[in-house]
Image (tube, rainbow, N blue to C red):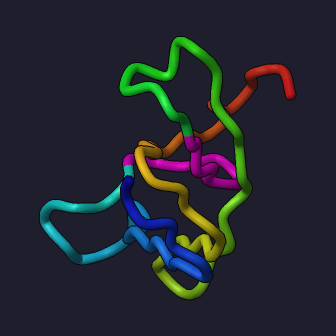
Amino acid sequence: MGADYTGYMISVADNSSTLLSGKLPAEYRTVYLLLSTGTDFSTGYTEYAMTQSGRTWIWTGDLGSGQHFTFATQLPGAPG
């Protein structure tokens, strides 16, 4: 059985970063971290709002063995 990770931090550069790769596309208000036990997120997921610190979005929390993650944001003008 795999390990669980407590107090794990995931960070990603925002779209204004000077990095050429490894950053998010343009975000609108908030970036969300989506966690799922399935690789394609079709069996459901848990959504967490990330915190912006300078040009980086950060999430700190617990990851279980076998969890997968991706990022999401609301499009401008989309219903909340």
Q: Which quadrant is the C terminus positioned in?
A: top right
Residue found farthest to the front: 1
Q: Is 43 located above or below residue 73 in the figure? A: above
> Who's the residue at 63% across and 49% down the image?
32
| Looking at the image, residue 25 lies above or below residue 78 | below
Whether residue 68 is situated above or below residue 37 in the rendered picture: below
- Residue at far right of view: 80
Work out which residue is located at the far left of the displayed protein and give it.
Answer: 20
Camera-nearest residue between 14 and 72 = 72
Residue at x 51%, y 34% (from the top left corner): 37
Q: Say whether residue 33 is magenta.
A: yes
Image position, residue 11 (x, y; %) = 44, 73
Q: Quadrant of residue 78?
A: top right
In the shown orientation, is residue 76 left or right of residue 27?
Answer: right
Residue drawn at x 73%, y 56% as measured from the top left: 49
Location of residue 51 in the rendering, given as x and y in whole percent from the top left corner:
68, 73
Give the camera-side residue of 3 and 50. 3
Point out residue 27 in the picture as x, y percentages from the top left corner: 55, 49
Check residue 52 for magenta coloring: no
Looking at the image, which is closer to me, 73 or 36?
A: 36
Q: Position of residue 8 (x, y in %)?
A: 52, 78
Which region shows up in magenta?
A: 25-35
User: How many numbered marks are there?
Assistant: 0
Residue at the image position 33 percent from the left and 74 percent from the top: 17
**Farthest residue toward the bottom?**
54
The answer to whether residue 21 is left or right of residue 16 is left
